[in-house]
Amino acid sequence: MKPAQLLVTLLAAWAAVILLVMCAAAPGAEAATTCNALQLSPCAGAIIGNAAPTAACCSRMKAQQPCLCQYAKDPNLQRYVSSPNGKKVMAACKVPVPSC
């Protein structure tokens, strides 16, 4: 195989690997949501204080929606999920309040 052909073959292989990695990590991919309450840190001002939720907060709230029951069952987090401000943030972000 000529060096130019080898280079093209290697570049094509790397492009395929990169494409596979990007598809696996793409938003909306069928991968399971990683539950991490720290992902909701943009919502702290709205949940703890009385600030309006930001776009970043709502984006994270929607991404973490599958985890809200887990957070509601955690003694350290349940007061935030079930608080009046927590419910206001979910309503403002159009995320249903979990019924667990």
Image (tube, helix red, strand yellow):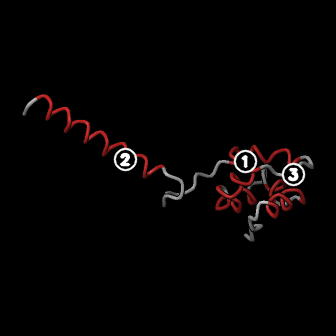
Q: Distance between the residues labelled 2 and 1?
A: 27 Å
* Mark 3 crowdedness (10 Å alpha carbons): few <14, some 14-19, many ≥20: some
First-in-chain label (2 vs 1): 2
Q: Mark 1 points at which residue?
A: 56
Q: Mark 2 points at which residue?
A: 19
Looking at this rendering, what residue extends furthest in the front direction? 4
For badge 1, the amino acid type reads Ala
Viewer-nearest residue: 4 or 80: 4
- Element marked by disc 2: helix
Q: Which residue is drawn at 75% across and 43% down?
A: 41
Q: Position of residue 49 (x, y in %)?
A: 91, 46
Q: Residue at x 32, y 43 (%)?
A: 17
Q: Is residue 74 above or below residue 4?
A: below
Q: Is residue 23 above or below residue 84?
A: above
Q: In which quarter of the image is the N terminus?
A: top left
Q: Name the residue under label 3.
A: 52
Q: Position of residue 93 (x, y in %)?
A: 77, 60
- Element marked by disc 1: helix
Q: How far apart are marks 3 and 2 (CA)?
A: 38 Å
Q: Residue at x 84, y 62 (%)?
A: 87
